[in-house]
Image (cartoon, rainbow, N blue to C red):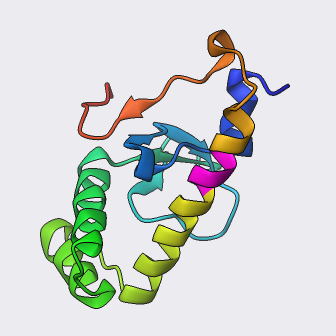
Amino acid sequence: MPTSDRFFDLVPPSLLDGQFAERLPRNRGSVIWGYGLDPSDPSYIVAIPEQLEFLRQGLDFLRQGHSYRKVARWLHAQTGRPLDHTALRERLHREQELQRRRRQLTADLPLDDAPKLIPVGATVAQ
């Protein structure tokens, strides 16, 4: 059974569940939108809560029927961080996969072993 420290290595929380991890191990070359490199340790990425809140709003716009292209342009205008529509689509699919995998793994996880999650929109202590 995974411990809280190892849990995020297996499945980070999904933004679709309204939660995000403050810090994650960097396991690929690019940094996912809504996160930035940890200045103290580049092998980790840290959350940028403002971007994640805009991303959550963008996901709501997608559910309302707006196109990926329009939402990506809106996110770029709001944050100044470029994001094209294909990257937004991949990011959403990643969140859906994380949500699915997290639900599978947490089905039998005792509550006292569950990792600490931060609700989207909450301030993160620096």
Image coordinates for residue 34, horizontal then vertical, percent: 38, 58
Residue 9, relative to residue 71: is it above or below?
Answer: above
Question: What residue is at 62 percent from the left and 61 percent from the top?
Answer: 97
Q: Report the magenta residues as a range.
A: 98-102
* Name of the residue lying farthest toward the right: 1
Question: What residue is at 70 percent from the left and 57 percent from the top?
Answer: 27
Image coordinates for residue 16, horizontal then vertical, percent: 42, 52
Image coordinates for residue 75, horizontal then vertical, percent: 22, 72
Q: Is residue 50 left or right of residue 24?
A: left
Residue 17, relative to residue 79: is it above or below?
Answer: above
Question: Would you identify the image quadrant in which residue 81 lies?
Answer: bottom left
- Nearest the viewer among 121 and 98 is 98
Q: Is residue 5 left or right of residue 68?
A: right
Verify whether residue 65 appears in magenta.
no
Quarter holding the N terminus is top right
Residue 18, relative to residue 4: is it above or below?
Answer: below
- Nearest the viewer among 27 and 113 is 113
Residue 6, relative to residue 53: is it above or below?
Answer: above
Quarter holding the C terminus is top left
Question: What residue is at 21 percent from the left and 73 percent from the top?
Answer: 64
